[in-house]
């Protein structure tokens, strides 16, 4: 094949690759953000939402967030917010664009490295269309994966360029490109080892003896070339370790013992291969099954892993692509295989984004060797490949649809996995946010059942029980949390439960403990103040109620409680001031209006102005209740009397008596009738 024909074929296949990938991922334009990290990374991250500013750029490079340090990834999210705001379409399309560029770049790199167009095209097409890649592309917070893939492949391209004519300038460019790569995602630390594999095949820089040619480079020099790259990897490892430790992402050996991690590693290596061959039951989170080295499934996976490794070593000279492909696959997965466990997942689709390339090398060049120059086999292989890629594209379209929103994503994960604690927890929280409390309780209880040590799930379950009024079950949740540690949140919610049960002394004890331990919720202060008020301790209540109002000035109920408190202390002016604030905040609250009207006409010395304002507020309460509620009518009658309008007072009192009798409130009707007698005598009713 001439170079011109080869070039045209590469361009044609590249265009076909772009079109096929766009078709497979077309549903992404309908997708929203999801609850898995999209809020932490984008929606609720002020350093990202504001776009690119000097402060946000400094933050990206100097701070770790969400247990990671990846400044270029943050910059890409900031740029998206600068361009598209919080419209998810722009964020998703950018990730898809990067993925398409990565697929085309992979095709060009493999073609350049090996000269084999069709195996390279096959590897790139599977890379682009495989359903395992959907998580990395369709997940907005997965930008770090596709971004790291871009700089990973770009670093390899620069390395190829460097090996053709080594020099200081080209090497410095290689270092710079790799430096950019490590600023996108920590797992790229294995890239120097991949470059060493490429030196063996297909760059053939490690030839020896009679087969050596001008491309041969001494092993010592090849190793020395990797030292500065390894230093950069080491620095990133240290930064990442502290970032993940600070963020609580790393799991200690007590939580996930070493033998369980090793067992999970071997099982995952084989399961990943299975997912590549048959990509079914893909989930956003795969549960950690806590296997150990004595389990039969682990021993089988260990045996299969060992046999493949031995075979790859056996073919190290005759089939170099097998050795390189296998070591690429195994080596690039090391940071994510779970030996140093970060998170609760046993494995994740996104971890295969680059590791898959090693397996595709084995498959692509293995088929090439198998069919040789036999035309019939080439036709059969081509037809089979088209069918397989078409099927992959169809499955990918379906998989992209599962990422359309949080509920769909989580529901699918529940369908395809069992005993999935994280997904049960996530689904319960999502249902809770939607107000589906009964359903939320079921799934949060499942999460607690699967992992009694998941105190976040237990706490959320307690909150759901609290919202449902199932106070005993809520109390049990928070007491269980306190058995295993000191939790200010647990004390706070126990205080809230006691408050709703009118166990005010218990509420005061729990809430003040929560406040001493650092809780700063306005609600904690307001409920403490209300409980103190209910137990006849107004002087103590004032401090807490004022602090609640300082933290959140918009709390009408707190203003009302302050009004009640000051009235108990005989400070009528301060009481009126706070009741007025309560009415201003909630002008349609008939209880507030009625209470303020009664307060204005209370006591012995009621001014004409106070009486007039009382009529105004009581009239408003009557209007809101369509003059059918005896309580505000009774207050309005008293206000008329305070203003000296006794005929209006008598008339309104009669309305109040009729309204009370209509509702069966005979006692209230009797009291109003007694007060009406005062009005007929030209005397006022003065509330205490």
Image (cartoon, grey):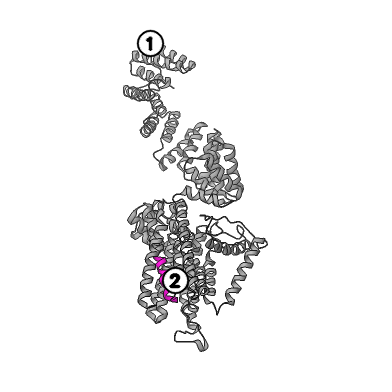
* Element marked by disc 1: helix
Residue occupied by mark 2: 118
The quadrant the N terminus occupies is bottom left
Density class for disc 1 (Cα within 10 Å; few <14, some 14-19, many ≥20) is some
Distance between the Cα atoms at labels 1 and 2?
Answer: 105 Å
**Can the viewer see residue 567?**
yes
Most extreme residue toward the bottom is: 210
> Which is nearer the eye, 78 or 159?
159
The magenta region covers 101-116
Count of marks placed on residues: 2
Main secondary-structure element of the magenta-colored stretch: helix
**Can the viewer see residue 234?**
no
> Which is nearer the eye, 404 or 60?
404
Density class for disc 2 (Cα within 10 Å; few <14, some 14-19, many ≥20) is some
Q: Position of residue 84 (x, y in %)?
A: 34, 54
* Element marked by disc 2: helix
Residue 104 quadrant:
bottom left
Of circles 1 and 2, which is in front? 2
Residue occupied by mark 1: 680
Q: Position of residue 328 (x, y in %)?
A: 52, 71
Vertical comparison of 626 with 127: above or below: above
């Amino acid at each position: 094949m001439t170079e011109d024909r080869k070039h045209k074929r590469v361009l044609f296949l590249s265009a076909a690759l772009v079109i096929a990938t766009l078709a497979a991922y077309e549903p992404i334009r309908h997708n929203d953000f999801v609850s898995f990290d999209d809020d932490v990374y984008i929606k609720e991250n002020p350093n990202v939402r504001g776009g690119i500013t000097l402060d946000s750029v400094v933050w990206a490079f100097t701070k770790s967030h969400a247990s990671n340090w990846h400044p270029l990834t943050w910059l890409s999210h900031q740029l998206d917010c600068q361009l598209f705001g919080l419209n998810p379409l722009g964020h998703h399309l950018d990730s898809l664009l990067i993925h398409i560029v990565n697929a085309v770049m992979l095709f060009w790199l493999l073609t350049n490295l090996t000269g084999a167009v069709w195996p390279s095209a096959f590897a790139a097409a599977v890379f682009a269309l495989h359903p395992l890649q959907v998580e990395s592309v369709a997940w907005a917070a997965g930008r770090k994966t596709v971004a790291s893939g871009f700089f990973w492949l770009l670093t390899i391209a620069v390395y190829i360029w460097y090996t053709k004519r080594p020099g200081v300038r080209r090497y410095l460019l290689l270092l710079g490109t790799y430096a950019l790569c490590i600023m996108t995602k920590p797992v790229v630390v294995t890239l120097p080892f991949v470059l060493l594999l490429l030196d063996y095949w297909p760059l053939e820089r490690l030839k020896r003896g009679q087969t050596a040619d001008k491309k041969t480079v001494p092993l010592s020099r090849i190793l020395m070339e990797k030292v500065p790259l390894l230093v950069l990897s080491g620095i990133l490892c240290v930064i990442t370790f502290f970032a993940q430790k600070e963020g609580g992402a790393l799991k200690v050996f007590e939580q996930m013992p070493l033998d369980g991690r090793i067992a999970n590693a071997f099982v995952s290596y084989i399961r990943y291969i299975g997912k590549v061959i048959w990509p079914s039951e893909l989930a956003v989170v795969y549960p950690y099954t806590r296997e150990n080295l004595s389990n039969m499934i682990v021993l089988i996976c260990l045996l299969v892993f060992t046999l493949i490794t031995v075979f790859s070593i056996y073919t190290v000279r005759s089939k170099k692509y097998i050795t390189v492909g296998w070591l690429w696959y195994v080596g690039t997965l090391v940071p994510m295989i779970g030996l140093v466990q970060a998170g609760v997942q046993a494995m994740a689709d996104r971890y295969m984004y680059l590791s898959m390339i090693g397996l595709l090398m084995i498959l692509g060049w293995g088929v090439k060797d198998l069919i040789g120059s036999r035309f019939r086999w080439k036709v059969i292989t081509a037809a089979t490949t088209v069918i397989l890629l078409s099927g992959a594209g169809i499955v990918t379209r379906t998989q992209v649809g599962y990422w359309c929103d949080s509920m769909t994503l989580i529901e699918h994960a529940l369908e395809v996995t069992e005993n999935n604690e994280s997904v049960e927890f996530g689904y319960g929280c999502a249902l809770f946010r939607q107000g589906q409390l009964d359903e939320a309780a079921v799934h949060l209880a499942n999460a607690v059942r699967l992992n009694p040590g998941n105190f976040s799930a237990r706490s959320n379950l307690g909150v759901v029980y609290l919202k449902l009024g199932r106070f005993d079950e809520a109390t049990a949740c928070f007491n269980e949390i306190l058995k295993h540690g000191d939790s200010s949140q647990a004390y706070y919610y126990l205080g809230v439960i006691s408050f709703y049960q009118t166990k005010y002394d218990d509420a005061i004890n729990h809430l003040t403990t929560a406040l001493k331990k650092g809780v700063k919720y306005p609600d904690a202060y307001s409920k403490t103040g209300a409980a103190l008020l209910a137990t006849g301790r107004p002087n103590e209540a004032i401090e807490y109620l004022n602090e609640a109002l300082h933290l959140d000035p918009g709390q009408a109920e707190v203003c009302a409680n302050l009004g009640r408190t000051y009235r108990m202390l005989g400070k009528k002016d301060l009481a009126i001031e706070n009741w007025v604030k309560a009415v201003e905040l909630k002008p349609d609250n008939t209880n507030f209006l009625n209470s303020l009207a009664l307060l204005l006409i209370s006591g012995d010395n009621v001014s004409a102005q106070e009486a007039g304002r009382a009529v105004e507020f009581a009239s408003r309460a009557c209007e809101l209740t369509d003059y059918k509620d005896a309580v505000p009518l009774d207050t309005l009658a008293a206000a008329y009397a305070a203003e000296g309008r006794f005929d209006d007072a008598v008339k309104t009192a009669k309305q109040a008596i009729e309204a009370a009798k209509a509702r069966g409130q005979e006692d209230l009707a009797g009291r109003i009738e007694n007060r009406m007698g005062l009005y007929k005598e030209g005397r006022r009713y003065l509330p205490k």
